[in-house]
Image (spheres, helix red, strand yellow):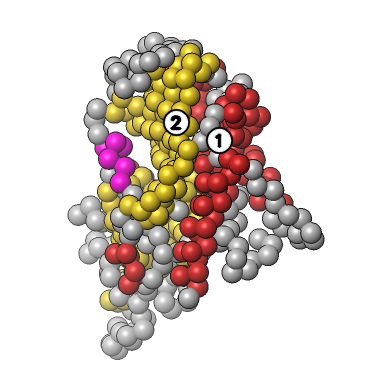
Amino acid sequence: MNNMTASNPYRSVKNCWYVAGFSKEFEPGKLTGHKIADRVMVIWRDKSGEVTALDNRCAHKRFPLSEGRLMDDGTLECAYHGLCYDTSGTCVKIPSQPDQPIPPQAKVNKFPVIEQDGLVWVWPGDPALKDTRKPPRTPEIADTAYESIDSGPMKVPANYLLLIENLLDITHFYPLHDGNIGDEENSKIPVQYEEGEEDGNKYVMTIREVENYNQPPFLADWFVYDVVDRLHTHKMVSPAHTRVEMHNAPPGELGTDKERGYTLFHFHTPVDDRNHIWWWCVNSKADHMSGGDPNVSAAKRVAEMFPSVVAEDHWALEKQQQMFEVPDDGYSELFLKPDKALRRARQVFLQMLREQDA
């Protein structure tokens, strides 16, 4: 990325809990390779159900351990020379020198892991700082009163802060999403802001409230009503997660049993400064059916139609990233009134990056 200076927020924050995947993605006994915030990892679930994350490079010749195999005793064998590691990252066997003690440097780094609410979170930064903040909670994903459907991991060739900015500033719903979830009237909805801290994570939130709003086509399809009062919030809970809530109801009926809507979880995990992995997960009450097809639940209907919206965002993020490769040469970015949350998110990133660099 061009202009990689200390004042550039488009870098990977390492001292953060990031989603490595949904719990269901980690099958017992299956090795998976990952790159999170420039740290390469091999992650697996053992027979007891515990998830382990180690540096993916064998201490001997840098061969990727994710290409190896798990042994019956639970150790991980490197496919190149057969060195075996336990779940602490310590080498416990070297086939080529069985009669000699194992060198103390025969070990690989272990990354902290927390599994909660159906997600596997990994800390790629300084392990001594892992308790300074906690992974964001997403209890609705595991709540049987709700139906949750996720996208699976999507590779996006753009810095992850660009996605966060996209999610916080929905004035791009027109024109980027015009005709599906957006229209020009959406751009005129007043924006309120809220900031704070939860479990060590600084958050930035936008709040948009509107009455007697004519819903764009997709939203009327998903949530039944053409004209609504609507409460719409976007909250960057941490660099790893943005939580979106939408509450729709006939005029005057917000907060009643006529309300329809969703929580849309976005998880954004940096691969490096130019790429990230994006998961989204739609979550609606299990007994709420869609307006477009009353035989299909709201969550399923969103999951069927939302990918076309995501494709438009993916296209925009990729195009933005390409422009970072061009020298500024006098270019100055314009900020508009609705960009307040976007700018605050950048400041949060810069603060975390300054602490990291120090």
Kindly check if marks 2 and 1 are in contact, taking CB atoms under 8 A apart as contact. Answer: yes
Name the residue type under label 2: His
Q: Nearer the viewer, residue 75 or 318?
A: 318
Q: Residues within 10 Å of mark 1 (few under 14, many from 20)?
A: some
SS type, badge 2? strand
SS type, badge 1? helix
Q: Is residue 285 magenta?
A: no
Q: Which residue is mark 1?
A: 170
Q: Nearer the viewer, residue 60 or 51?
A: 51
Image point 75% across, 59% down: which residue?
328
Q: Which residue is mark 2?
A: 232
Image location (x, y in percent) of residue 330: 79, 59
Q: Quadrant of the N terminus?
A: bottom right
Name the residue furthest right: 329
**Vertical placement of 325 versus 153: above or below?**
below
Q: Nearer the viewer, residue 107 or 329?
A: 329
Q: Earlier in the sequence, mark 2 or mark 1?
A: 1
Indicate left or right for 314 with 223 as reference: right
Image point 63% across, 68% down: which residue?
5
Name the residue furthest left: 48
Image point 36% across, 80% down: which residue?
106
Image point 76% across, 60% down: which residue?
327
Measure the alpha-carbon separation of dots 2 and 1: 10 Å
Image location (x, y in percent) of residue 22: 36, 45
Name the residue type under label 1: Ile
Image location (x, y in percent) of residue 39: 47, 65
Name the residue furthest top: 294
Which region is colored magenta? 137-142
Could one spot residue 82 in this view of the protein? no
Q: Is residue 139 magenta?
A: yes
Could one spot residue 158 in this view of the protein? yes
